Amino acid sequence: FGSSHRIRLKSSAASSCHLGFKMARQLRVAAALFACASAETFFLQPLEEKAGAQELALVLIQGASCPNDGYKPLAEAIQKASPYKLWVGVPEFAADTPQPLQYGFAFDGIVKKMKEAGMKAERTVIAAHSLGAVMSQIFLTSLGKGKADGLVLMGATVLRSNRNSADLPPTLTLDGDLDGLLHVTRQAEAYFHQVEKAGGPKAALDRPVVLLEGLNHWSFSSGDLPGNVAKHDIQAEVSMEEGHAMIARTISDFMGAKFGDAEEKKNAQAALATAVEKTGELLKPVMEAMHMEGYRYFNPPCQSDYPTNPTCQYPKYPDKSLIPGSKAGPPNPMPPADCTCGSEWVATVGAHTMAGLEGTAAATATLIDKDAFQDVSDVRPFHLPHIFEPMPGTACEDPATCKINMTTVTMPIYDIRDKLDTGLYPVTASEYRTKFKSREAIQQQAGLKDVNFTETDKFNTDTCRSINQKAYEWALSKASPKALARFQKHGQPFVFVEDLKSGIGPTGPTWIHDELKFEPTEDKKSVKVQSHYFTTGNKKMGDVSFFETVGYHYCKLLSPARAMEWIYVDGLKEFYGIKPESSNSELIV
């Protein structure tokens, strides 16, 4: 391969007399950090057999606590796969961790040294791993605007804050489907915005998303595992060499699609579009589950009090506030016209399971539910489930032909750590707080006789459990054959136990804050899932003031997307992770 040069770089900066004291101090700190780290900076000259080809520069940026010499095998693989005369520079950062103050010195320094060694490349691509990819986005959208002609994010993704940024150059998102430090669900989010919304694989070549099967987070490097990787990553299913070759081919296609001559560009674009299309197939079950959830970062949730999506048609109830005239104003900005009305899962499977009409005289009745995303604690106005047809106080004469129109209210809860947008933690809803009309209320208005609240709701510890069991079974049925087989062999299956009834506290039902419980068994071979529920008996078939809390059954629900995320990522980590055997890992659900 091309010759390798390890060098000590010196930084140069404008005289501090032209800068404020604070900026001058920051530059001196950065220069000192760079000087401390520069002993391990290296670059590879192009391969001799590529001498007549177009000349390009590639700067590889390390991940956090990932020694930069671990990227040399990948750098060599990229040089081998590329048809270009490719220079590869790999700067070293202090403590092997890229950070903003040092980034500009490191990037400019390695490019300068490659030029001093004879590089005449007119185009530069940055390929950055993990935290290095985050720092690269910060650099390219601030002080480094225009300094790179392309960007490759390895084991990383375009930050949500950069999703609509015009400052990033053409960007390839490249990852493995077994990355334990960046959830595949986060890459599904990237695929939705960068590919599906862009018009599909062939139209999305400015920001393509490619997942490579069998690769994990560490597949982009080599050598000893950093602690965080050892703690969180999943086992790769391809060798390091094979993984590097797959990565190198994809990066080569990306560069060819952007910088090749007419024929090279045509072939590279076709290969890249095929890789993006295969990624869509791989992500299809995951994305279907996230759509079922009403995932907040696909299309944002609607505000049913101020409707903007004409397809929702959600009837408000009671549309009254605790203090008359205190209704909250409209959101600013208003949700877009394609906002998500509510949870499709709740409106279909959840509502029908709650009704429990199977095996009754109303088994053939028609039940239509509309769900809305709202804060279940809101009192400006209240948001409560309601049966609109038959009208409150009335019931169907013939249960078999009854038509029931009702609403539910759902509040998805997300892990607060996802706001960091690292992808390390689950991105799907950790639970649904869902308010249903009770089984008693639904069955009474369906025209069934002698409905017993004690049996249907009050002491029924199976209803919420059953909905959650169905979410898990749905996810298992939709997972890809390979993902399902992997999970069945190595994963921790969910086991659903009886619902736990919530009581009344000083501020009302404790159900709101009683979380959906995930508890590993003693041998860790499975995880017990338990819902909390709260019920109230019905009265006059609901024909009372909304202040009388009658005919409700509230559940803590498992999102089908969280079940899918467990199958693909988090449920594998205990027995298929690469963490040290002595590690006491935190259960992340």
Image: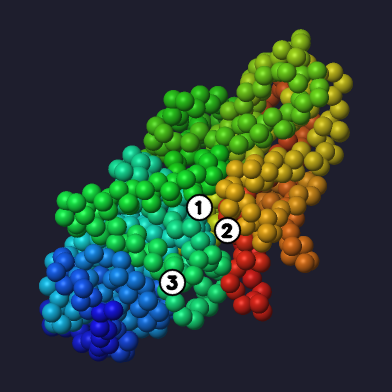
The residue that mark 3 highlights is: 241
The residue that mark 1 highlights is: 185
Q: In the rendered structure, which disc, 1 or 2, sits on the residue that comes first in sequence?
A: 1
Where residue 71 appears, as percent x and y from the top left, is 37, 76
Q: How many marks?
A: 3
Q: Disc 1, disc 2: CB below 8 Å?
A: yes
- The picture quadrant where one finds residue 2 is bottom left
Packing grade of label 2 (10 A; few <14, some 14-19, many >=20) is: many
Q: CA gap, disc 3 to disc 1?
A: 26 Å
Up-down: is 472 above or below 58? above
Which residue is the extreme one toward the front?
Answer: 49
Q: In the rendered structure, which disc, 3 or 1, sits on the residue that comes first in sequence?
A: 1
Tell me the kind of residue under disc 2. Answer: Val
The residue that mark 2 highlights is: 569
Query: In this view of the protein, which residue sits in the foreground, 368 or 379?
Result: 368
Which residue is at 47% across, 67% downward? 217
Task: Locate the N terminus by quadrant.
Answer: bottom left
Which residue is at 68% across, 43% downward? 473
Q: Could you say whether the residue bearing mark 3 is in a helix, strand or loop? A: helix
Packing grade of label 3 (10 A; few <14, some 14-19, many >=20) is: some
Tell me the kind of residue under disc 3. Answer: Glu
Q: Disc 3, disc 2: CB below 8 Å?
A: no
Q: CA gap, disc 1 to disc 2?
A: 9 Å
548 horizontally vs 26: left or right: right
Q: Could you say whether the residue bearing mark 2 is in a helix, strand or loop? A: loop
Tell me the kind of residue under disc 1. Answer: Thr
Q: Could you say whether the residue bearing mark 1 is in a helix, strand or loop? A: helix
Which residue is at 76% across, 21% downward? 363
126 horizontally vs 239: left or right: left
Packing grade of label 1 (10 A; few <14, some 14-19, many >=20) is: many
Where residue 38 appears, as percent x and y from the top left, is 29, 87
